[in-house]
Amino acid sequence: MCDYSLENQISRAAVMGDRLVTSSFPMTPTRGFAAEQEAGVAVCLLPGTELAFEEPVRYNGLWGHLVNQLKARLGFDMAKATLARFRQVDLDNPHTHHDAIELADGRIIKLALLNECQRARVLQLPAVADPVLRHEHARFAVSRHHDDLTPAR
């Protein structure tokens, strides 16, 4: 899924093996994933998509820095925080960012807090019991892409 603030961006569904980059998008207050070779095109992930970052995940904000420092002092190996699973949080609040990643150590980080230019690869897409749902997700992403390119009349 793509967060509500990316609704007006050109987007597409993630595919297995995609190489992604954390990016800011023009005229939006959020960050998300773009394909390495398609700057400016938001890549939408289904909840449960597994990602492997090239380096330990970095995120901004005071809390992010403090949590990292505290965990390091408690003996957690922060270098292993390179695997993540995409999920959505705070779905009961329609006026906040929902897209997040959950790291293997249990930390949940909203995509809007991720530092830009981090590289990740899609390791695995979630199993969807209904293949029609997966097809609809892909078709929706493609149709949104084409609809955004249609000139206004």
Image: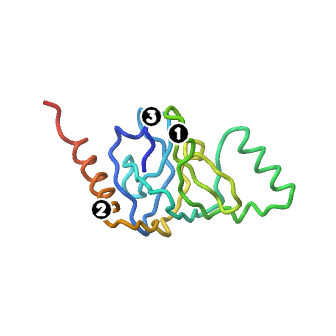
Q: Which residue is mark 3?
A: 28
Going from N to C along the chain, the mark reached first, 2 or 1, is 1
**Apparent side of residue 60 relative to residue 49 in the rendered image (left or right):** right
The part of the image, by quadrant, that contains residue 37 is bottom left
State the image quarter where residue 51 is shown. bottom right
For image coordinates 43% across by 37% down, the residue present is 5
Circle 3: element type: loop
Q: What residue is drawn where x is 41% and y is 40%?
A: 6
Separation (CA) of disc 2 from disc 1: 25 Å
| Pointers 1 and 3 in contact (C-beta within 8 Å) | no
Residue at disc 2, secondary structure: helix
> Which is in the foreground here, disc 1 or disc 3?
1
Going by the numbered disc 2, the residue's amino acid type is: His
Work out whether mark 2 precedes mark 3 in sequence or the reverse, and give the earlier one. Answer: 3
In the picture shown, does residue 147 fall above or below 124? above
The residue indicated by pointer 1 is 97
Tell me residue 124's x, y (percent): 48, 69
Residue 30 pos. (x, y %) = 50, 38
Q: For the residues marked 2 and 3, what is the alpha-carbon distance in whole angstroms?
A: 28 Å
Report whether 147 appears left or right of 28.
left
The color scheme shown is: rainbow
Q: Amino acid at mark 3?
A: Thr
Discs 2/3, front: 2
Identify the amino acid type marked 1.
His
Residue nearest the observer in this picture, 107 or 43 = 107
The answer to which image quadrant residue 136 occupies is bottom left
The one nearer the camera, 138 or 77, is: 138
- What residue did someone put label 2 on? 135
